[in-house]
Image (cartoon, rainbow, N blue to C red):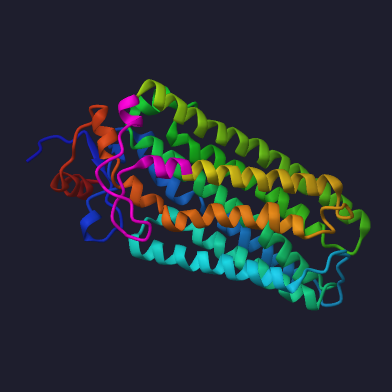
């Protein structure tokens, strides 16, 4: 029986074998910042979700029946159907993983996939009513803004991944404290999200001047988002290089648990999650550069008038990156990083100790 517990691991909503904790994710009960950061990481996504639904449906409702869109491109039905099917399939799988394995911090991912699928569904409707302002606003905002939720997921994953190795690894390998990653980048995402929402709704107007102004506003939001996510990607790369050079015992630790893509059991090799996170960042950067180039050219530009670019550099990279999380479900890897944490001398916490302290918190 413990007389004093210095560190605890929070229990997660997992099936019985994993109910002890998010393995290795320890929060010092005396560290108010750490405790607040843990809670904040789970609740900071709410502004993004609220902004997505509010901006899309509120602006769509405001569009009057007689309002006409000045969109030059009539979306093709077949590629939109393919996009709908792919995002819906992956989204359903994400929902299954969420309910099967748990971890609520992953909630923005299936929601983002669902809203992307909804964007393609509305895109199909736009083919039949290309001048409908409400439909154009809905599909533009859903497809333009849903990826912000994908960015938010990467922010939270990196913060949790770097935290489980202990304060020494985090301090020496991270340019920003893990507890601040979600706070800084999610709020940055919220800001750029709202800028893009305002500009995106204006680009569907029937007024040419309003369209040009909307393009400029979206351009500012996309540029800021690209800079922010570029800095985040730098954090990931620097973290990997520093762990490899400064903590080889952590870098080389792979764990004894094997990797089965569709299982629910923990996975010991954290490198799989790390490289998947890197691929996700690459896909998002490709998409961000494409969108920035598109809005630099304007709504009459070559890229905007040829939707093949949209599917090749936006829809496809994002779908591949986020679908990887169907098989590389992050909570499975975060469950079993005890080995890396113990390599740094972190104390083990027994299941009974977790329950004891959890009841006190």
Q: Reply yes or no: does residue 345 show up in magenta.
A: no
The residue drawn where x is 62% and y is 59% is 52
- The percent position of residue 131, horizontal first and vertical second, equals 85, 72
The residue drawn where x is 68% and y is 54% is 314
- The percent position of residue 229, horizontal first and vertical second, equals 61, 39
Q: Please state, as top left, top right, bottom left or bottom right, where the N terminus lies in the image.
A: top left
The residue drawn where x is 33% and y is 33% is 165
- The percent position of residue 43, horizontal first and vertical second, equals 46, 51
Extreme-right residue of the structure: 208
Confirm whether residue 118 shows in the render: no
Give the magenta range: 248-275
The residue drawn where x is 60% and y is 51% is 148
The correct choice, above or below, for 293 with respect to 209 in the image is above
Q: Name the quadrant containing residue 38.
A: top left
- The percent position of residue 237, horizontal first and vertical second, equals 51, 31
Q: Decide whether the magenta segment is chiefly helix, strand or loop.
A: loop
């Amino acid at each position: 029986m413990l007389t004093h517990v210095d560190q605890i691991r929070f229990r997660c909503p997992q099936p019985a074998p994993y109910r002890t904790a998010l393995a290795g994710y320890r929060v010092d009960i005396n560290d108010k910042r750490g405790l607040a950061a843990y809670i904040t990481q789970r609740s900071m996504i709410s502004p993004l979700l609220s902004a997505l639904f509010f901006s899309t449906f509120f602006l769509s409702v405001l569009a009057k029946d007689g309002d006409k869109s000045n969109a030059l491109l009539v979306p093709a039905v077949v590629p939109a159907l393919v996009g709908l099917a792919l995002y819906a399939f992956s989204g359903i799988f994400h929902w299954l993983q969420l309910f099967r394995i748990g971890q609520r911090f992953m909630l923005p991912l299936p929601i983002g996939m669902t809203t992307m699928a909804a964007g393609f569904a509305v895109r199909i409707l736009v083919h039949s009513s290309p001048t409908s302002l409400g439909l154009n606003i809905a599909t533009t905002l859903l497809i333009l803004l849903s990826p912000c939720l994908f960015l938010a997921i990467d922010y939270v994953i990196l913060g949790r991944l770097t935290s489980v190795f202990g304060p020494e690894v985090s301090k020496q390998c991270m340019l920003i404290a893990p507890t601040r990653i979600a706070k800084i980048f999610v709020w940055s995402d919220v800001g750029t999200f709202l800028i893009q929402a305002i500009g995106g709704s204006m680009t569907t107007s029937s007024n040419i001047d309003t369209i040009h102004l909307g393009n400029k506003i979206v351009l500012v939001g996309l540029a800021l988002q690209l800079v922010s996510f570029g800095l985040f990607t730098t954090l990931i790369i620097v973290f990997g290089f520093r762990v490899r050079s400064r903590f080889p015992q952590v870098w080389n630790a792979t764990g004894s648990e094997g990797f089965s893509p569709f299982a629910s059991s923990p996975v010991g090799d954290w490198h799989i999650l790390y490289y998947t996170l890197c691929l996700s960042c690459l896909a998002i950067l490709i998409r961000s550069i494409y969108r920035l180039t598109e809005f630099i050219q304007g709504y009459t530009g070559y890229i905007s008038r040829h939707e093949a670019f949209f599917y090749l550099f936006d829809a496809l990279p994002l779908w591949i990156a986020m679908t990887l999380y169907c098989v590389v479900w992050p909570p499975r890897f975060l469950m079993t990083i005890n080995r890396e944490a113990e390599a740094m001398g972190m104390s083990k916490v027994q299941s009974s100790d977790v329950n004891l302290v959890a009841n006190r918190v």
